[in-house]
Amino acid sequence: MDAALTDAFEAQRPRLQRLAYRMLGSVAEGQDVVQDAWLRWTRANSNLEGREGVTDPAAWLVRATTRLCIDRLRAAKVERAAYRGPWLPEPLIEPLTEDPVERAEDVSVAFLLALERLSPLERAVFLLHDVFEADYAEVARTLERSELAVRQLASRAREHVRDARPRFTVSQEEAGRLATAFMTAAATGDMAGLAALLAEDAILVSDGGGKRKAALRVMVGRADIIRLFEGLAWRGGGPGNITDIRTARINGYPGLVLSLGDGPETIAFQPGEDGQIAAIYMVRNPEKLGHVAG
C-alpha cells in the first residue's frame, strides 16, 4: 500500500476511534474495529483486479467502521443480556491537567448508558447525525436505508437520550477537590463527610462483571450508598491495599484511578447541583481495565 493511502487512513483514525468507542462503549473493542476497518481499507485499495477504487476516504472509512460496530453489537446482544451485575462502559481516561480531547457530553457514562438502550441502527443514526454531524443523506448511504427511515430512527433515538447529557460541569480545580474529598472521607471512615458530598437522590453503579466483587444492583439514594460503604468497612479493608491514587478525567467526569493489589479500578463522579455528587460509577471488571495502568 502506498504512503498516500496510509496517510489517508491515519488522518481519519482519531475520528474512527471516537465513533467506535461511542458505538461500543469499549476502548479495546473500538481499537479492534478500527484495525478491521484498516484491513478492509487495504483490500479495497489493493492492486488486485476488481479493486473498489475509493474516491472519498473519510466517508468510506466511517461507513466501514459503522457497519463493523453494528455487527459487533448484534453479536454481543446475548452476552450483554447475561452480564453479571450492572454494565458500565470501559472508562475513557484523560489527565485532569490537560484540555479534554473528548467533549464531556458525548462520552459521559449517563450518555453512553442511554445509547445502550437503543438498537444498533438507532445508535448509529444518532451518533452519525447528532454527534458527528453527518447529513441524513450521508447517514442513509452509510446504513443503506432510505432518508425517511433514517429520520425516523433519529427521532426515536433522541427521545431516549434527551436527558442523558450532563447538565452540570465543574472546573478542573473543583473536579480535583471533589475526587479528593470523596476518597479522604471513604478512606477515613468519615460517613458524615461522605454523605455531605452526595445528592439526596444520588446513585452508585459498580461493575465487577462477575470477575471482582461489586454490588449486583444499582444503589439508589444517599442512605443506600452510605450503607454500602459502611458494609464494605473501607477503613479496615477496602483502601488498605491501595498502592497509588491519581485524579483523572473519566468519561468527562472528575474521577480517581486506583492501583490495588488485584489490579486497577476507576471511580467517576457525575457532578450534580450545589457541588454535590449525582452519581458514582465504579469499574472493577479487569476485562475493562486492560488499558489502565495499574
Image (cartoon, rainbow, N blue to C red):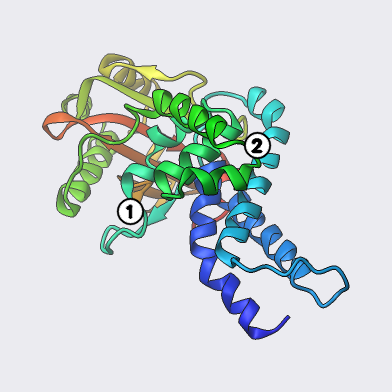
Can residue 247 be seen by looking at this rendering?
yes
Give the residue number, with chain letter if any, for mark 2.
73
For marks 1 and 2, the one nearer the N-term is: 2
Residue 167 at what x, y percent from top left? 23, 34
- SS class, disc 2: helix
Which amino acid is tagged 2? Leu
**192, above or below 12, in the image:** above
Residue 134 at what x, y percent from top left? 46, 50
Extreme-bottom residue of the structure:
3
How far, Cα to Cα, is label 1 from label 2?
29 Å
**83, above or below 168, in the image:** above
Q: Residue at horizontal 40%, vertical 23%? A: 159
Query: Is residue 169 shown left or right of residue 47?
Result: left
Give the residue number, with chain letter if any, for mark 1.
248
Query: Is residue 186 shown left or right of residue 140?
Result: left
Q: Quadrant of residue 36?
A: bottom right
Q: Residue at horizontal 15%, vertical 26%? A: 196
Q: Nearer the viewer, residue 72 or 125?
A: 125
Q: Residue at horizontal 39%, vertical 19%? A: 219
- SS class, disc 1: strand
> Within 10 angstroms of label 1, few (less than 14), some, or many (20 or more) residues?
many
